[in-house]
Amino acid sequence: MRGLGVGAISLDWTAVASFLFSPLISPFFAIANVFVGYVMLIYIVIPIAYWGLDLYSASRFPIFSSHLFTAKGKPYDITAIVNDKFELDKVKYEEHGRIYLSMFFALTYGFGFATIASTLTHVGLFYGREIYERYCASYKGKEDIHTKLMRKYKDIPSWWFHILLAVTVAVSLLLCIFLNRQVQLPWWGLLFASVMAFVFTLPISIITATTNQTPGLNIITEYVMGIIYPGRPIANVCFKTYGYMSMAQAVSFLNDFKLGHYMKIPPRSMFLVQFIGTVLAGTINLAVAWWLLSSIHNICHDDLLPPDSPWTCPGDRVFFDASVIWGLLGPKRIFGSEGNYPAMNWFFLGGALGPIIVWLLYRTFPKQSWIPLINLPVLLGATGSMPPATAVNYNSWILVGTIFNFFIFRYRKQWWQRYNYILSAALDAGVAFMAVVLYFAVGLENKSVTWWGTNGEHCDLAKCPAAKGIAVDGCPVK
């Protein structure tokens, strides 16, 4: 859970498909790109940077952690550098010193920079002409069989989308204007986030449609808002939510409508189900989160919770630390002239140039059909879910995906075409049903199912630094 996960494996479908989605529906070339990117970072770059070069004093900190640290390897006390408005107190920050990241966390941001840059150049080079041709053909092109069959249903009126967009933007603007003290986001930040989501939806949709992997806008939205509006962490996460999640939900919406198009589901029914489901899910999620935060003491504070507590919230920890890095401090104090990691900005250039090299190789050797399968947005962004995902999630996902995408496709092609998606959906549904059954069967009685695979961390020292003389609670001093 905290190390490099050599040999870590799981057959639990929640571990296999929780972060990278189902490997059964990802093409093998995408799995290969994820594998190369994962191995390159976890088993080549990280060991060299940590043990070989000790970059940025990496050995003072755990090798795999999303926490923030002081120069002496101790957890950074964020409450000591903020005022009552949860804004940065510059005097106290100077007293406490700079924030340090684990080697993995720092490189994760670097590869995130490269991913977003490579997405734009990759789509522009490999799909630019096709995008233009399909845009022109959309007005005069011939309808395929699916579109002809869908003509028997009433289409969704455009004004449904326009009204929904107008209402949500209006409500969000009112939130930013009249509750500005709470959300910190100015009205122009909301509009800017909406523009970013609109611009990136098409290129990221193309990557998703061809690879089943979706590069995120979280890092670039955090970076941009951190430069423009530093010192306000809540404004930064609000901007990220409106920019990144609007794009991600748009891609998910398109994905569902694509499936509904092939399954011949009435478009209006799809729209209403999506709308009602979003309202229900958002309301229930907010209510449950409020209940958990108010009823569980020290929730998400893994250093204050009892051993083996399930309430460590790894995803929320990453979200919180990102608000500190990008919002409270700002990129200048982490990745700029006042920070420890300015060299990470070179990843932007590397990510932008990478697809150009691949495209030139393909133009030079057009008969080599494997060259265009090198998808740098997927390869460079392979570990974008780490943390909170760990090596066990990636090992399991790659293994299961390779078995189903290679061996079954090769020896049982007809079976694959008929039942692969059904099996993937069945496994997803099985997890949901079992979660409910286990909760009512044993959860309400405060019981648990214990076996060798549910004992949590099997390498407790993985959370400890490797440098000599660094004293951390729960770790031996070298």
Image: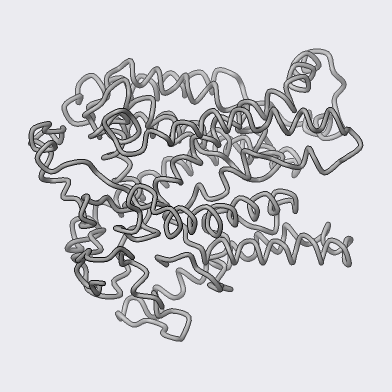
**Residue 157's x, y, as percent?**
61, 21
**Residue 33's x, y, as percent?**
68, 49
Q: Is residue 303 above or below residue 361?
A: below
Quarter where residue 3 is shown? bottom left
Question: Which residue is outermost to the right?
Answer: 367
**Residue 145's x, y, as percent?**
87, 33
Closest to the observer, 447 or 81: 81
Q: Residue at x 34, y 25 (%)?
A: 225
Closest to the observer, 139 or 201: 201
Q: Residue at x 65, y 39 (%)?
A: 376
Q: Residue at x 41, y 23 (%)?
A: 193
**Residue 261's x, y, as percent?**
73, 37
Mark yes or no: residue 448 visible. yes
Q: Residue at x 29, y 46 (%)?
A: 320
Mark yes or no: residue 235 visible. no
Q: Quadrant of the N terminus?
A: bottom left
Identify the image's colour scheme: rainbow, by chain, secondary structure or one colour: one colour
Question: Which residue is outermost to the bottom?
Answer: 451
Q: Is residue 191 above or below residue 147?
A: above
Report whether 109 appears left or right of 396: left
